């Protein structure tokens, strides 16, 4: 049966959020204590387009490496695709 109780306040450490982008305070990189919001900021504000760039900006992924797959998921969702525009000859 469905419960209508409000969700508990986010502590950022449960790792039970259903998907990328669902909880800004969630710790994505436990080794370096990097939050989801910091990773999204690295991608959207600072223009990181690779796992290495996110690592350089946030240090996420530079410990055990367990979070690297998740960082790639953030890149897939938040990094803008590089669009190549070819100028038509006039
Ligand atoms: S959890 Fe990110 S490097 Fe270990």
Image (tube, rainbow, N blue to C red):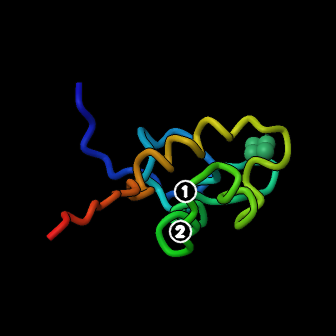
Image position of 82 with respect to 41: above or below: above
Image position of 87 with respect to 71: above or below: below
Identity of the residue drawn at 45% across and 52% down: 8
Image location (x, y in percent) of residue 10? 51, 57
Q: Residue furthest left?
A: 90
User: Does residue 32 appear to the left or right of 47 in the view shown?
Assistant: right
- Location of the N terminus (image quadrant): top left
Packing grade of label 1 (10 A; few <14, some 14-19, many >=20) is: many
Image location (x, y in percent) of residue 39? 58, 60
Packing grade of label 2 (10 A; few <14, some 14-19, many >=20) is: some
Query: Which mark is drawn over residue 49?
Result: 1
Quadrant containing ligand 1 reads top right
Identity of the residue drawn at 69% across and 59% down: 34
Query: Which mark is drawn over residue 47?
Result: 2
Q: Nearer the viewer, residue 30 or 41?
A: 41
User: Does residue 77 appear to the left or right of 4 in the view shown?
Assistant: right
In space, the residues marked 1 and 2 are separated at their CA atoms by: 6 Å
User: Does residue 68 appear to the left or right of 77 in the view shown?
Assistant: right
Q: Nearer the viewer, residue 42 or 52?
A: 52
Q: Are marks 1 and 2 in contact (CB under 8 Å)?
A: yes
Identity of the residue drawn at 42% across and 41% down: 19
Q: Nearer the viewer, residue 60 or 81?
A: 81
């Amino acid at each position: 049966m469905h419960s209508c109780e409000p969700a508990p306040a986010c502590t950022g450490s449960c790792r039970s959020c259903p998907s990328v982008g669902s909880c800004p305070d969630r710790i994505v990189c436990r080794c370096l204590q990097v939050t989801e919001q910091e990773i999204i900021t690295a991608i959207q504000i600072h223009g990181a387009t690779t796992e290495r760039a996110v690592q350089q900006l946030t240090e996420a992924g530079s410990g055990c490496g367990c979070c690297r797959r998740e960082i790639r998921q953030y890149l897939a969702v938040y990094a803008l695709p590089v669009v190549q525009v070819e100028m038509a000859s006039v």
